[in-house]
Image: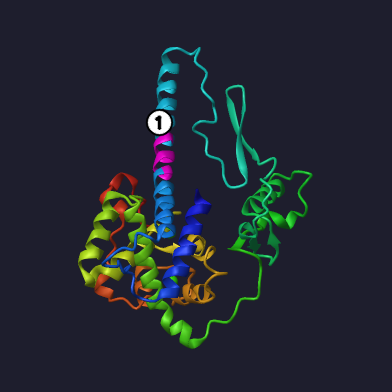
Amino acid sequence: MKWSLLQIFGLLALVCLAYGDDPDVDIPDDLNFDDLEELEDDEALLREVEEKHMEVDIDRENEIARDVAMAFNKINPRVEVDPCTKVHCGAGRVCQADGNKASCVCIPDCPVEADPRRRVCTNINETWSSDCEVYRQRCLCDTKDPTCKNQKLKHIHIDYYGECKQLPECTEDEMNDFPRRMRDWLFNVMRDLAERSELSDYYMQMELEAETNMTKRWANAAVWKWCDLDGNPPDRSVSRHELFPIRAPLVSLEHCIAPFLESCDKDDNHRITLKEWGNCLELDEDEMLERCDDIIKPSTTTPHP
Ligand SMILES: [Ca+2]
Ligand SMILES: [Ca+2]
């Protein structure tokens, strides 16, 4: 699921960056119904959307069923509940049940990936067949497993998705134009998520505001993405680590993204504040209001350090 979202973002980026600043799609006045291929594409897209909704529904039903089983188990302990149900293991690990005990172990095997698009470039400039292989090897070295190839690999991480390659230099002209393209891209990603109902009610409102108020359009999308990135921990600043979901899938597609993100951290303290984010996207400082979803949900707010 994560990978497919990253792919969608990557594809969106390509489309948006390729077509410039007009996000509106032209709808012809008279549809040509002979063009069946296009209609079939639309139908395929619709099926995909429906299937995604169905998957979400099934996940919800399973969650409810597990909760019911857990509640019933309190009254009647004969009902067995998988101890892994509520266990979340990190990347490269899976939950293993032993009686009623659960523990996280390294993934025994990663799926064989023939698709070159699944390859990843690591921080040691090595191409690996998939992100799973990287995380699995790191787990093996972390846990001092004898199959760890090299102890140094316990620090391995993914630099970007795709094969390692010599990235072209981002020219001055490209860099000057990049904030505008980035603003467009952020707005289009936000709009796409809203159309698929994948934003919280709070961000749906921000998206609606962005659609109806041109002065808020780019700022709302920029604020939403900054809040979205600031999740680990949500401390009102975005660390280099937190930039991963926006950086790693785009580096091999858009060679200016890495230097652009570095340029956002003006004071070079490895953290991007909302003010720095607004500045590098060339947005009006007055529009960059800290409007993260958790502000209106005090129970989930992490205190500011
Ligand atoms: Ca943070
Ligand atoms: Ca900074």
Residue placed furthest toward the bottom: 173
Counting from the top left corner in percent of width and height, residue 294 is at: 31, 51
Q: On the image, which quarter does residue 97 sit in?
A: top right
| Residue ID for mark 1 | 61
Q: Residue at x 42, y 46 (%)?
A: 47
Tell how many labels: 1
Q: Is residue 16 left or right of residue 163?
A: left
Q: How many C-alpha atoms fall within 10 Å of the one at disc 1: few (<14), some, or many (≥20)?
A: few
| Secondary element at tag 1 | helix
Three-letter amino acid code at the position of disc 1: Glu
Q: Residue at x 39, y 68 (%)?
A: 185
The secondary structure making up most of the magenta span is helix
Residue placed furthest toward the front: 34
Residue 217 is at least partly visible in this image: yes
* Looking at the image, residue 216 lies above or below residue 66: below
Q: Nearer the viewer, residue 206 or 10?
A: 10
Q: Is residue 303 magenta?
A: no
Name the quarter where the C terminus is drawn: bottom left
Counting from the top left corner in percent of width and height, residue 279 is at: 36, 77
Q: How is the image coloured?
A: rainbow
Task: Please provide the residue range marked out in magenta.
Answer: 51-58
Q: Nearer the viewer, residue 183 or 261?
A: 183
Counting from the top left corner in percent of width and height, residue 54 is at: 41, 39
